[in-house]
Image (cartoon, helix red, strand yellow):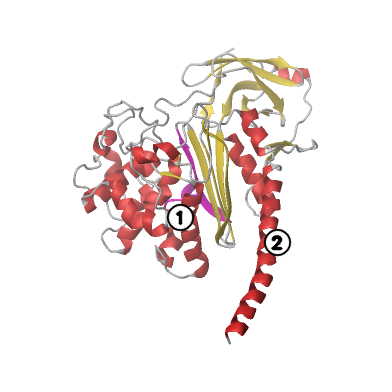
Amino acid sequence: MRYFSLFAIAIVLCYCGPKKDTARREIEDRIKRIENGLQPNLQIEGEEVPTYNIEERLRELGIPGVSIAVVNNGEIEWARGYGMADSAENRKVDVETMFLAGSISKPVAATRAHQLSEQGIIDIDEDVNEYLASWKVPDNEFTTNEKVTIRRILNHTAGLTVWGFPGYDKGDTIPTAVEVLDGKGNTDSVRVYKEPGESWMYSGGGYTIMQLMITDLEKSPFPGIMKMNVLDPLGMTESTFENPLPGKFHGIAATGYRRNGDEVEGKWPIYPEMAAAGLWTTPSQLILWAVEIQKVLQTREDGLLTKETVDEMLTPGMNGHGLGPGVSDVSFGHGGADEGFRARLIAWKDTPNAVVVMVNSDNGSIIQEVLLAIATEYDLPGIEPDVKTIVDLSEEERMKYTGKYRFPEGEIVDIKIKDMGLEGREGWFDEPVYLVPENDTAFFNKKSGTSYTFMLDGETVTGFKVWNLETTKIE
């Protein structure tokens, strides 16, 4: 019998060994295709699309490092780090290197609010002031008929100010959450500026109110609450909401860098607004949150949250935002932008796939390029390049757009003819920007893809729009 068992084991080993090796080689080949298949986000109709090697692309873009984790079939199929975690220390990025997740902190923090709702401790449609003890949202003319609720905080419809936070440097006096909310830190006070529920406006200030609500209810520091109830149960045991970052993590934390290559003061910022922006983690750890939510969604079995809660969390509201993550037709996730760090998390609704990409730079442009390569390799929907068409406009047609334009903050930009397009100089632009025509009234930056749409009153040009800013033509 013993000989039969040994013989059976030998057969299994002979069968499984080569099969496992083949699978590993296939994954390595897949990784190589991705590493050498980065695509630019901006692609011009009719022009050949270049591909880039990831290490070379980091150097070209001036980004120190990037870390990636990919889930396939519900498991982490691979994770890799590239470039430098700290250039001065000659310390490379690896899978254990920690990054600030920026606003991806929000859906992870929202998980605890959902747990409290499931436990009957809070009602997410109740006035949040019912649960706040150390501070209250000040009532004003906008809260007469509608209140700030947890649901509205989670999906950014609470009508609250302060969209984001710049963080604090090492050596700064770090305000408490209450001081942040009252404008005693480096941002304005968090207040209701329009009727709650009326419209969508992103608010990190709202998530700071949620953070305070959780600590008031549980009478414990926020990082400990999150570690016990969310991070550790998910297996994110080497992640933390603690700010300042504890010394035990300093040796594996990436240093943040500005676009010009300078280190962030003190190597990384400090965020007392932990729920909004303060999670330290790795792609391999952060992706576990996505896997858990995705598993509940797809298996219809309760997990860290119930299937009913996950369904509600992933129901898109105004501006496509759910109760924590952003939600599209095919995926859910969030982006992150802290001082010196950028990140992106995407998980697919119908297939067990997810991706996290994190960089230690204010320049996060490589993230979309990596995502395009991964989406191509795994045939994942919803990640598309920005494809633009260049049209021919005569110099006479372009001439009416030349002149000086004033931005809302007073910066003046001079638009002139250049080659087959326009060029913007001075003021708001850090360097001359070359704009090519997309149609009769819209131009785009051929380097970044940013669109500039000119506004006309009849045949008279009155200004142009870029992002959410609107200029006025002054001459």
* Residue that protrudes farthest toward the front in the picture: 3
Would you place residue 159 above or below residue 264 in this image? below
* Residue that protrudes farthest toward the bottom in the picture: 1
Would you place residue 120 above or below residue 452 in this image? below
Is residue 325 covered in magenta? yes
In the image, 72 versus 214, the foreground residue is 72
When asked about the image quadrant of residue 289, the answer is bottom left
- Three-letter residue code for mark 2: Thr
The kind of secondary structure element at disc 1 is helix
Quickly name the residue at label 1.
289
Estimate the x, y position of residue 98 in percent, counting from the top left: 46, 42
Quickly name the residue at label 2.
22
What's the residue at 64%, 36% (across, down)? Answer: 55
When asked about the image quadrant of residue 357, the answer is top right
The kind of secondary structure element at disc 2 is helix
Estimate the x, y position of residue 287 in percent, counting from the top left: 50, 52
Q: Which is more foreground, mark 2 or mark 1?
A: 2
When asked about the image quadrant of residue 6, the answer is bottom right
Estimate the x, y position of residue 347 in percent, counting from the top left: 54, 54
Quadrant of the rendering where the C terminus is positioned: top right
**Of pointers 2 and 1, the one earlier in the residue sequence:** 2
What's the residue at 72%, 27% (across, down)? Answer: 437
In the image, 251 versus 362, the foreground residue is 251
Residue 201 appearing in the image: no
Residue 430 appearing in the image: yes
- Three-letter residue code for mark 1: Trp
The total number of labels drawn is 2
**What residue span does the magenta drawing correspond to?**
314-338
